[in-house]
Amino acid sequence: MTHVALESTVITHGLPYPANLHLAHEMERIIRDHGADPATVAVIEGDLIAGLSPQQIERLAATSDRQVGKVSRRDLPVVVARKLDGATTVAATMWIAHRAGIEIFATGGIGGVHRTSGPGPSTDISADLQELARTPLIVVCAGAKALLDLPATLEYLETHGVTVIGYGTDEFPAFYSRSSGLPVDICCNTPQEVAEIWRAKRGLNLAGGLLVAVPVPPEDEIPAAQIEPHIEQALAECEAAGLRSAEVTPYLLRRIAELTGDRSLQANLALLRNNARVAAAIAIALDSD
Ligand code: PSU
Ligand code: MN
């Protein structure tokens, strides 16, 4: 069995209904069509699940107004103890997927180091980055949104020993945009190349994950200059509203989606489908050694 894990915060907090529901089912279908098995991850009534049923996906997707909490590593003991539902972030999905014996995970954008308007570095650093440093899983993403401090995000990953692979690119992609001007550690052009690096990492017993960054398909790209004014507006509104901690990312995601309209939603859906394809191909390559 070659499983590809999928997260659920993107379903509850990252995309509007019903596009989120269709996308969640579509990513599973793409993975199956490539000969691998999807495992969408979430917490349901306190149980950690790697492989939601279609009904469970529907239940998460249809919850409006964030009735289902966003669950990162620190929230896991709380939702388990209280037998709650929870939508897992990249960090919590990695932890649960690894525990279930899964080696690869497809998502859209990872969390990172937030931008700061004041002096000095930001202290808002997503738990996704820590998780990449400690949990052994291949994470396929489209980079990270430019609402984050991308140079600081890549430096954090470097400091913590996370190899960043550009898939068909030398640059770290910026989610809606294919390039950020920031170099990745290594470029791979085939699933086999990624599988070889993963095997070497395992053979060396090196802790932590491997980040595979895949640019959004060219036809769905939104140039950085078009997104940037909207990002700046959303960041200013977020600061004015005094939002902190786990509220920041969902607020920014929602606001940028509102400000950029249908085009950003289409780009978001396209890159998620693309990442499901790439992750499934890598999963098959891992399986055939
Ligand atoms: N970035 C996106 N889309 C998302 C997320 C981030 O472009 O859906 C979600 C992911 O689940 C990610 C989480 O793990 O937000 C990060 O939240 P925070 O920054 O609070 O760690
Ligand atoms: Mn944060």
Image (cartoon, rainbow, N blue to C red):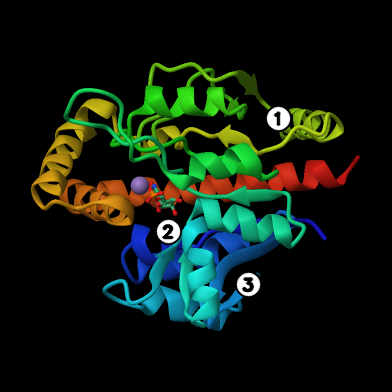
Which marked residue is nearer to the observer: mark 3 or mark 1? 3
Give the residue displayed 33% in from the left and 40% down from the top. 124
- The local secondary structure at tag 3 comes to strand
Outermost residue on the right side: it is 289
For the residue carrying disc 3, how many other residues have a C-alpha within 10 Å: few (<14), some (14-19), or many (20+)? some
Q: Would residue 264 be found to the left or right of residue 287 on screen? A: left
Q: What is the three-letter code of the residue carrying label 3?
A: Ile
Query: Which of these two is toward me, 94 or 6?
Result: 94
For the residue carrying disc 2, how many other residues have a C-alpha within 10 Å: few (<14), some (14-19), or many (20+)? many
Q: Would residue 220 be found to the left or right of residue 231 on screen? A: right
- The residue beneath circle 2 is 10
- The residue beneath circle 3 is 49
Q: What is the three-letter code of the residue carrying label 1?
A: Thr
- The residue beneath circle 1 is 190
Q: Which of marks 1 and 2 is nearer the N terminus?
A: 2
Q: Earlier in the sequence, mark 3 or mark 2?
A: 2
Gap in Å between the C-alphas at discs 3 and 2? 16 Å
Residue 198, disc: none
Q: On screen, 72 above or below 150? A: below
Q: What is the three-letter code of the residue carrying label 2?
A: Val
